[in-house]
């Protein structure tokens, strides 16, 4: 299928593919990617041969669990023993346009044509010709700066490569050039705006910033509210992973989950068993890039936890949406087969006004996981009010974290300290 560039809401036609067409598009690309990597990347040949899988046995997303998950540590180790690309490169050195370096280090060979699709993530945020965008991601020793720079250009906007740091110069540049867009992390934009105010600028009057595109850290709802309501800066976020060359998912104007990028096969898997999970189930994001034929990365385990939803989005994009990054796989605790993520539990518990602090304690009795919630209150409640709060907490935990606590204990103030972990796993496995 030819990729046609569009000039309206969508960057190209792929964003509005029907489920059936997308499946065909992705499966075909997946089969080609695996066959190509098997023929040209020794690391991939080793992996399939060891797993006893022939390349033509990988035809659809459901075939992928036949293959192991490759982690960042595996990439680093393989590149150390088989320098420089660890046997993942599929092209002769002279045909590589650029080499992206991610912390580790991990070296990723890329050809320019391989990054065009990436602009979708910026187009969806509204960047267009006429915008002047400061790109505050670093331009060296990381793919971020140059990758986002090209994407800003592919949207027709003007890119200003300011890189990270130099807060005063950032403020000055935005003011002098009348920059309309910001690309970076939410915390860096907050730092820049704070500095601008210290320097005597009135953000709304003296700067022209109207939209910001973030990745690298999740945008807290409170920060989004400040930026959008107080400073009138429209905010968008995307989920990007440097080792797999780009944004795996991005927000549209609805800002309700991040649409999956069609240039990856994204699986949500149980980090322990590698089993693929369905909509609404929390697991690790595993990505297979379909866009970079030079780089035979298959089933890259990101270590990040999320889930996806399949409900249609009013924006018209048809790709499923990631619900957000809920935490690291290593910070989650599996209780009765479901991952409980500290950050998610925190969102639920602290949304109730009387709750000051909480802690989840997981134990095991008679072969069954037991999850108790300890709650510290800001002020004393009657027995009746406590019972009502318990019921609501329990219901919300079930809704959001998909697991119901076995009991809720109200503990005296000062029992739970700020330094204590939000989830304590006291299970023993004898
Ligand atoms: Zn949408």
Image (cartoon, grey):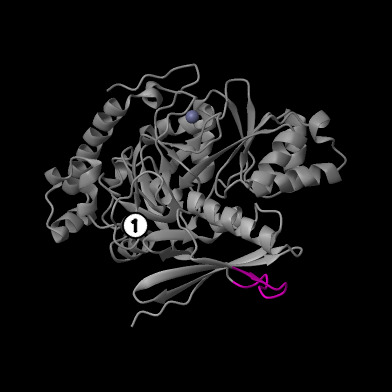
Query: 176 above or below 407?
Result: above
Question: Depth check: 26 or 100 in front?
Answer: 26
Image position of 155 (left or right of 31): right
Query: 42 above or below 239?
Result: below
Residue at the extreme right: 200
Image position of 410 (left or right of 98): right
| Image-quadrant location for residue 91 | top left
x, y percent for residue 127: 58, 26
Does 413 lie within the magenta span? yes
Question: Depth check: 165 or 405 in front?
Answer: 405
The magenta-colored residue range is 409-420
Does 114 lie within the magenta span? no
Q: How many tags in the picture? A: 1
Residue at the extreme front: 384
x, y percent for residue 316: 45, 23
Mark 1: C-beta under 8 Å from nearest atom of ligand 1: no
x, y percent for residue 107: 39, 53
Quarter of the image with the N terminus is top left
Query: What residue appears at the point 40 percent right and 76 percent down from the top-left corner?
Result: 365
Image position of 108 (left or right of 184): left
x, y percent for residue 184: 61, 43
Q: Pointer 1: what residue? A: 270
Residue at the extreme top: 7
Question: Depth check: 105 or 301 in front?
Answer: 301
Considering the numbered disc 1 on the image, is that residue within a helix, a strand or a loop? loop
| Image-quadrant location for residue 125 | top right
Query: 68 above or below 187?
Result: below
Residue at the extreme bottom: 430
């Amino acid at each position: 299928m030819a990729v046609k560039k569009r000039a309206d809401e969508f960057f190209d036609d792929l964003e509005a593919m029907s489920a059936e067409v997308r499946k065909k598009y992705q499966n075909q690309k997946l089969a080609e990617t695996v066959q190509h990597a098997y023929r040209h990347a020794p690391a991939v040949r080793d992996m399939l041969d060891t797993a006893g899988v022939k390349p033509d046995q990988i035809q659809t997303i459901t075939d992928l669990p036949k293959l192991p998950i490759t982690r960042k540590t595996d990439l680093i180790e393989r590149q150390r023993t088989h320098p420089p690309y660890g046997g993942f490169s599929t092209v002769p050195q002279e045909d590589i346009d650029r080499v992206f370096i991610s912390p580790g280090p991990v070296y990723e060979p890329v050809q320019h044509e391989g990054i065009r699709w990436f602009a979708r993530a910026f187009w969806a945020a509204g960047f267009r010709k006429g915008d002047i965008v400061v790109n505050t991601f670093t331009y060296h020793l990381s793919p971020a700066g140059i990758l986002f720079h090209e994407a800003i250009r592919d949207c027709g906007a003007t890119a200003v490569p300011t890189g990270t740091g130099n807060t005063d110069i950032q403020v000055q540049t935005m003011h002098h050039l009348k920059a309309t867009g910001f690309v970076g992390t939410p915390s860096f934009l907050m730092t820049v705006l704070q500095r601008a105010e210290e320097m005597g600028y009135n953000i709304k009057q003296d700067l022209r910033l109207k939209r910001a595109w973030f990745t690298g850290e999740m945008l807290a709802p409170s920060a989004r509210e400040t930026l959008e309501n107080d400073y009138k800066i429209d905010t968008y976020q995307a989920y990007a992973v440097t080792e797999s060359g780009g944004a795996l998912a991005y927000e549209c104007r609805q800002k309700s989950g991040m649409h999956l990028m069609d240039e990856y096969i994204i699986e949500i898997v149980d980090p322990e068993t590698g089993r693929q999970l369905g909509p609404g189930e929390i697991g690790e994001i595993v990505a297979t890039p379909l866009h970079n034929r030079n780089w035979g990365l298959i089933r890259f385990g990101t270590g990040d936890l999320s889930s996806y939803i399949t409900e249609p989005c009013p924006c018209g994009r048809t790709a499923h949406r990631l619900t957000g990054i809920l935490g690291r796989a290593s910070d989650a605790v599996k209780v009765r087969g479901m991952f409980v993520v500290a950050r998610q539990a925190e969102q639920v518990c602290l949304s109730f006004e009387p709750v000051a602090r909480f802690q989840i304690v997981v134990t095991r009795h008679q072969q069954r996981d037991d999850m108790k919630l300890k709650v510290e209150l800001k002020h004393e409640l009657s027995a009746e009010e406590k019972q009502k709060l318990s019921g609501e907490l329990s219901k919300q935990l079930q809704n959001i974290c998909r697991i119901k606590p076995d009991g809720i204990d109200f503990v005296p103030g000062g029992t739970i300290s700020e330094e204590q972990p939000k989830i304590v796993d006291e299970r023993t496995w004898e």
